[in-house]
Every structure is written in C-alpha cells, then in structure tokens.
Image (spheres, rainbow, N blue to C red):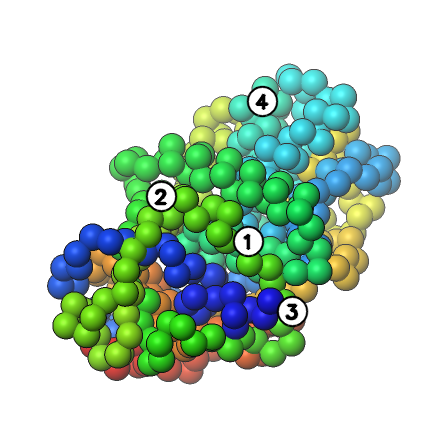
Amino acid sequence: MQRRHLLAASAAGFALPAWSLDFAPPRAPAAMRLDVDRIIDITVGIRPFRARGPRLETQRLHGKTVVHHYGHGGSGWSLSWGSAQRALEQVRATGLRPGQRLAVVGAGAIGLTTARCAQQAGYRVTVYAKDRPPRVHSSAATGLWTPESRVVTSEFATDAWTADWEAMARDSFKVHQSYLGLPSGPVEWHDGYVVGDDGFDRPVPSPYDGEPDYPDIAPRVADLRPRGLALAGGDHPFRAPHARRFTQLVFNIPAYQRLLLDDFARDGGRLVQRELRSARDFARLPEAVVVNCTGDGARTLLGDDSLTPVRGQTARLIPQPEVDYALIYRGHSIVALPRRDGLLIATQSRQDFGSADLRPDRAQAEDAVRRLAGLF
C-alpha cells in the first residue's frame, strides 16, 4: 500500500488515522496567533527509519554482550515502553541478574525508557551518551502518539511482526496513561482538527521523494483512539472546505524528558557524558552487558546501512495557553500542536527522506506559519 493511500491525514511524517476522531460537538476554538515574528526556536531532528522495523537482537561485540535496540523511525516515543520491555527480555536472557550493573548507550526516547525499565527490574544502570536532552534527536519530535509512523515497510510486515508491534503499542499506551494528570503535564489528551482542500476520500500523495510502501497496521490499535466525525462548513471556523475533529494523545516532550531524567537519578541512575565513536568503544565500558540505543547514531557507530535518516523540522512559537487544540493541514505536510513549551509547527519537504541535514530552514518554517494562518 502506498503511503498516500495509508494516510488519512498528512501530519509532518506522522500518520493520523481517519477513525481517531471525536464525536463530541465542537466548540469555537481560540485563534492561533500565526505570525512569523512569534517564532522563538527552530529544531531539526533525524528519525532512524529501518525498513525491517526496530532492531532488537543480541550480539557479542569486542568482548561485550550488546543488546541492539534502535531503528524506530517516527514511532520512538510512541513505542518506547513496549519496545524497552522486549529489550529487557534480551538482557535477562544474557544471564545478567537484578542488582548487577547494566550500561545503556543513548539518552533519547528509547535510551531513557530502556534505562527506566531496567531500573524497575532491579538493575543498576548507567547511561552513556554523547548528548543529553534537549540536545538529542528525540527532543525535536512533534509529540503525537503515532506507533505506526514509519516503523516498517510492507515488505517486512509479516503477521508475526505485526502482532508483536501491536503488543508493543498497547504496552506503551498503558504506561503513557500512568503519566496523565501529573503537574508538569508530560502526557495529555488534546482535541484537534484535520482540515483539507479536498475531500477525505481522496488519497494524499507521499510528502517525500523515494519513500517506500508502508503497511496499514493502524486499525489493529483503533480501539485506543476515540472515534469521531466529519464537520460541516458551519461547524468549524477554518477556511478549508473539509474538516474533521479528532482526539489524540500528546507528549509534552521537555516535561516528559525532565521527568524521566529525574526519576532515573532518584533511583540511583548515573548519566555519563561520553561519545562512542566506533564499535570498539563498547570494550571501554566497565559493564559486561550493554544496551545500544543510539538511534540514527548507529549508522556511524556500527556502520549500519539498514538505517535511513529522515529529517524532521519543528518551529516553536510563543506559547498560547488558550489554544488547546491541534491543527493538521492535510496534503500540505503541516501540523500545529499546542504544547506547554510553545505552539509547535512541524513541517516536512520532499527531500527529507534519506537526509541527515541538521541545518534549520527558516524559510520553510515561515512558509508553514503563513499557510496555516491562511486557514483562519
């Protein structure tokens, strides 16, 4: 299935299914203040896409037992807890016992959740990382719960793989619910609108050049997303002729990362700032078992050419607390998300698939803001 047939809404690289919609009657939303002079930050991150799906396997490497745990594409935050539980199963299979020391390499979404899962299982964990939040690629994520986003190609989505993916998604979703209601709001539910120039029955072209086919696996977790309905022209305030209302789980990533780091430190975890430049550097770590959560960094660290970098850019506008809804401009590859750290505008361009270019594109960000402003 081509991605353009899979997506019900184009959401800066994240798939938002048509059934994730809320039947509640809409209320008039506060207008977003979409002015380019309100941009306060532009961040670029790299999604580590792997056609076969995330790498979860154990290898003896330079005298160490290394559990590889990376390659989640655009689903890192969404699948993090369920995937970490499976990495932990491989750690246990090495014979490492609770109370013994474990190394985790990488401090992104996958690294931090793997470290927390290992702590909860009784291991003494040290995280080694070149950078820590907010200077990791996971910090640039949009923050929507999208466990099906660029996680595997149709070629490798066997029945067994898809069943395991569903279990990971459900396990992660359950843990995410435990973060609801906390003062910092690391995880929240938000309503939103998908708007488009064409009807929702028309396919959306892939936003990227050279992007592969993806399987239609989202229906397997459809029960975890509220359903909803299309809105008539008089039921929404946007200039676009077509609109739907949805409800979606959102991660306030700065608050979420800070909470994970605080919990990790509280339970005795150590974070050591250290860059591993080659696989031989695993031998220099004092721990016998290492979980490799380096994401896109594995392309350099291991020479892993199964990874494809996918560039993603987000611009942050001055926060608007009165704006409590997301906005997705279908077919234009633009998402606006109300987060506590600002109104986040996520964009993509046709050249982003296969690109590891970390340079911010101010013109792209300003164009997205202007196009969204035209909807009001």
Q: Which mark is residue 187?
A: 2
Nearer the N terminus, badge 3 or badge 2? 2
What residue do we see at 65% from left, 76% from top? Answer: 210
Q: Is residue 372 above or below residue 191?
A: below
- Whole-percent x, y for residue 334 in the image: 39, 72
Q: Which mark is residue 217?
A: 1
Q: Secondary structure at mark 1?
A: loop
> Where does label 3 land, which residue?
212
- Which one is closest to the eye, mark 4 or mark 3? 3
Nearer the N terminus, badge 4 or badge 3? 4
- Which one is closest to the eye, mark 3 or mark 1? 1
- Which one is closest to the eye, mark 1 or mark 4? 1
> Where does label 4 land, which residue?
121
> What is the CA distance from the residue labelled 4 to the residue labelled 2?
23 Å
Nearer the N terminus, badge 1 or badge 4? 4
Left or right? Give the position of 147 relative to 240.
right
Three-letter amino acid code at the position of disc 1: Ile
Which of the two residues, 149 or 269, is positioned nearer the viewer here? 149
Nearer the N terminus, badge 2 or badge 1? 2
Q: Which mark is residue 64?
A: none
Q: Secondary structure at mark 4?
A: loop
Three-letter amino acid code at the position of disc 3: Pro
Three-letter amino acid code at the position of disc 2: Val
- Which one is closest to the eye, mark 2 or mark 1? 1
- Whole-percent x, y for residue 351 in the image: 58, 78
Three-letter amino acid code at the position of disc 4: Ala
> What is the CA distance from the residue labelled 4 to the residue labelled 3?
38 Å
> What is the CA distance from the residue labelled 3 to the residue labelled 2?
31 Å
Q: Secondary structure at mark 3?
A: loop
What residue do we see at 26% from left, 79% from top? Answer: 241
